Image: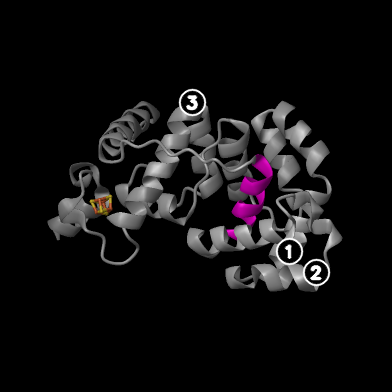
Amino acid sequence: MKETEVVARIKEIAERLNQLFPKVYRTDRTPEEQMVFTILSQNTTDKNAEKCLESLKRLTNGDLKSVIGFSQERLIETIKPCGMYNQKVKAIISIMKDWESLKEKLKELPVQEAIKLLTSYPYIGTKTARVVLSFSFNKNTFPVDTHCYRVLKRLGIFPENRDKDKISEFMEEHFDTEFNRKFHYNLIRLGRTICRARKPECERCLLKDLCRFYGEKNFH
Ligand code: SF4
């Protein structure tokens, strides 16, 4: 597909997803809560991450920056249900230690530099950085998580071997903040409800006429 066709196809898909999921996702988490939540949510469910975030908020009396005053053992105990607790505690401590100045820098920096700064911290990858920058700093980023990646791959919009960061960069170049935030979240919604990893419900999917996976499945 040519670049202009890819852009037109994405717009069409996004419009249909907006009809399916008319409610726009907004978070009421503060930027530091979102930062910690995004770290906690790696390789676990949002429900688990939410529970652990609440436990951490209780432990710190709502001031997540004060995690640095607790022992690693205590913090590990608090976030254990989220898994990968050693790495997650290290990531949370190192980010919260710098949070006040980091937050100010993130507000000012252009997207690519903000991503570079965040990913210089341990265990913070580009997807985590992009989620935080989109939802808490209103930056134009397009995080590609496993749901987004699977759905986009099945739809066949991008070449099969296109990596996640390259997809993010394409989206950031061609679409604005609001579009990307909504499209990212709606792909996740579709991936959780219809285009699930196992047994996607293609027959009831409103994208099937645009989907390579569906086309191939029904051709053979
Ligand atoms: S048609 Fe099937 S594979 Fe394609 S997006 Fe819909 S659920 Fe996923």
Does the rendering let one see residue 109?
no
Q: Secondary structure at mark 3?
A: loop
User: Is 141 covered by the magenta stretch?
Assistant: no
Q: Which mark is residue 72?
A: 2
Image-based side of 32 in relation to 190, left or right: right
Q: Residues within 10 Å of mark 1 (few under 14, many from 20)?
A: many
The three-letter code of the residue at mark 3 reads Asp
The answer to whether the residue bearing label 2 lies less than 8 angstroms from the nearest atom of ligand 1 is no
Q: Position of residue 85 (x, y in %)?
A: 68, 69
Q: Earlier in the sequence, mark 1 or mark 2?
A: 2
x 49%, y 61%: residue: 47
What's the residue at 61%, 63% (across, down)?
52
Image quadrant where one finds the N terminus: top left
Q: Considering only vertical position in the picture, is 85 above or below 98?
A: below
Where disc 2 sits, the SS reads: helix
Report which quarter residue 89 is drawn in: bottom right
The range drawn in magenta is 31-41
